[in-house]
Image (cartoon, grey):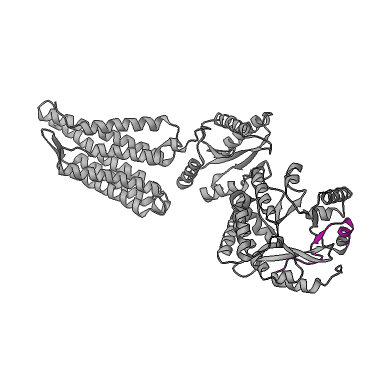
Amino acid sequence: MDLNIEFQCAGLVILIIVLTLFTRTKNLKLTNSRLFFVALLSCFLCEILDIGSIVAIYHSTHGELSHEFTKVICKLYLMSLALQGYQGFEYASSEILASKKRAWLRWVYRLVFVVGELLIAVSDISFYMKGRIVYSYGPAALCTYGIAVIFILSTIVIALVGRNSIPLRRRKAMLVWQGCWLVAACLQFAVPRLLLVGFAAAVGMVILYSELENPNEYLDRETGCFTRSAMVLYLRDKYLHGGKFALFVARIGFMNHADYELENNAIMRAAKAILALGKEPVFYLDEGEFAVIYRSRTEMERKLEILKDMASNVKDVPAEGKYIVVPDGGIFQGAEELFLFIHNHEYDDVTRVLADEEAVIQLRKDIVVHDMIESALIEDRIEVYYQPFYDTGKKSFTAAEALVRIRDQEGNLVAPGTFIPVAERSGQIRELGIRIFEKVCSFLATGKAQALGLNCVEVNLSAVQFDHDNPTKFVLKTMKEYGIRPEWINLEITETAEADVRQVLLMNMERLSSQGIAFSLDDFGTGRANLDYFVSMPLNNVKFDLSFTQGYFVDEKIRRVVSAMTKMIHDMGMKIVSEGVETDEQMQGMLELGVDYIQGFCFSRPVPQDELLQFLKQHNSGGQPG
């Protein structure tokens, strides 16, 4: 018995392997994954019926099987072929036709499929076999070809026109998949003995599996959890298809002195504990941060309490748990907004952040501010305001701090407290820092301020700058371009730099300091730095925070601390800038304390460069300001 089923058998083996791999690996149970599984089963069924129809035709032509039974088998094969085309279309169009506005179109295609299947069932069919050439023909076969063409072409159109809503990788895989079918169908039509359609369908399933549906691609090998990319897909699926959910994000907040081995061990233990909580999908977002998604708020809160109890019993790891709780995922407009909320709050200095209506409203306000900053950077609505320092030794204004200001599209100044926190969270603070430094250098290059007694300008560089950029190269390159002398620039850094940034920060400070650039430490005493870190910095100046300056006059304990720190800093060879001095009484108190520079509204608010020049002309004639 010489049956032309080699390609079908090969396709069947391929499908068995893909089915085994797909079902044995933990997956996210996404809508697309379920549709792929159904398409895979329909392809498997089609392959079996293809082989069955060839066997039946063989036995029928040899008088061993009734023609009527053979026709039933052949029709079942053709119906499975139409089913395969329809399931392929369902898989390809799941995202495009998910919206309520397009639901009618999905029902149209379902109706086409049902009508097509009925036509195949009631239409006549014949079959032919001569040697290795075997096929079915007649009205039922023509109906099958028509339905297959409709669904194949519709799938190709979906892939081509859905470029804005379907990822490129997915579109390419879909086009290659349908292309395999078309090429195989054309070859089989030209050379009837090449029964390639079933094999091509199996190859298409392999392409879809390897490119789009391989669960291993979304598993973190170390923790056994799903990856951040998997969470993006999962949430997109939830929002697209209307599934309700709640989630929490748990982050291990390590103390500064935890080493890598200890941290990694703690992360592995945490992953094991969270996975043991239940069958809900667990995602590892990196750097000791996990997310777990639940179907209900009640279940999420119950499991979160269990996790907190487990964490409280861990005594051998210098860390604390930080949690972001989302009781109702529907409060966000989509996955992107939810991820932005997580990003904005994952390093908050609180143990629990709740995603309630108020928090989401604030998030949307922040998005508006973010877009405003972006447009201001593009349209150059960034300005530098300067607040002068009074030099208590020279009794004149010899320095000024450069402060960033932004104008909205109506030309109004935006309050720094509105845009700076958003810029710091979004990373836009880097570009703002670059823009301000360039503008300061451009101003100093004119020499006008120096001619009026200003010796240097203090410019803030965010710790984020040191984490992502090469500040030494940027600073020196920009100063060279504008012809700026090192002593004209004083770089201000904050004490609140994260521990993992500190080594990079210190290295860059040393390099810039060796080139003659001075450094000031802002917000001294209010940050996270320890004494070793403070002593290791190549600092020239230390700035007393507003709370220190104001507290000096109202709290005896603060007064004693500030007095002791003043002596200590001077003994270390550094100078002191007192910020936030607002009254003549406070100014006199700072003079008596012995600080080197006084900054505050008692002299001047931050002003544009033209007003700064006017201020210097008016006040730098010598003597103590009155």
Whether residue 93 is visible, yes or no, is no
* x then y, percent, for residue 471: 62, 54
| Left or right: 490 as drawn, with respect to 586 | left
Q: Quadrant of the C terminus?
A: bottom right
* x then y, percent, for residue 272: 56, 29
Q: Is residue 18 above or below residue 549?
A: above
| Front residue of this view, candidates 200 and 317 | 317
| Front residue of this view, candidates 580 and 484 | 484
Q: Quadrant of the N terminus?
A: top left
| Front residue of this view, candidates 501 and 105 | 501
Badge count: 0
x 32%, y 45%: residue: 89
| Front residue of this view, candidates 157 and 102 | 157
Q: Is residue 459 above or below residue 466?
A: below
x 27%, y 33%: residue: 11
| Left or right: 39 as drawn, with respect to 472 | left
Residue 17 figure quarter = top left
Q: Magenta segment, which residues?
A: 588-607
x 77%, y 69%: residue: 453
Whether residue 345 is visible, yes or no, is yes
Residue 361 figure quarter = bottom right
* x then y, percent, for residue 217: 44, 38
**Does the magenta run of residues contain 595?**
yes
* x then y, percent, for residue 223: 53, 32
x 10%, y 30%: residue: 61
**Does the magenta run of residues contain 356?**
no
Q: Is residue 360 above or below residue 66?
A: below
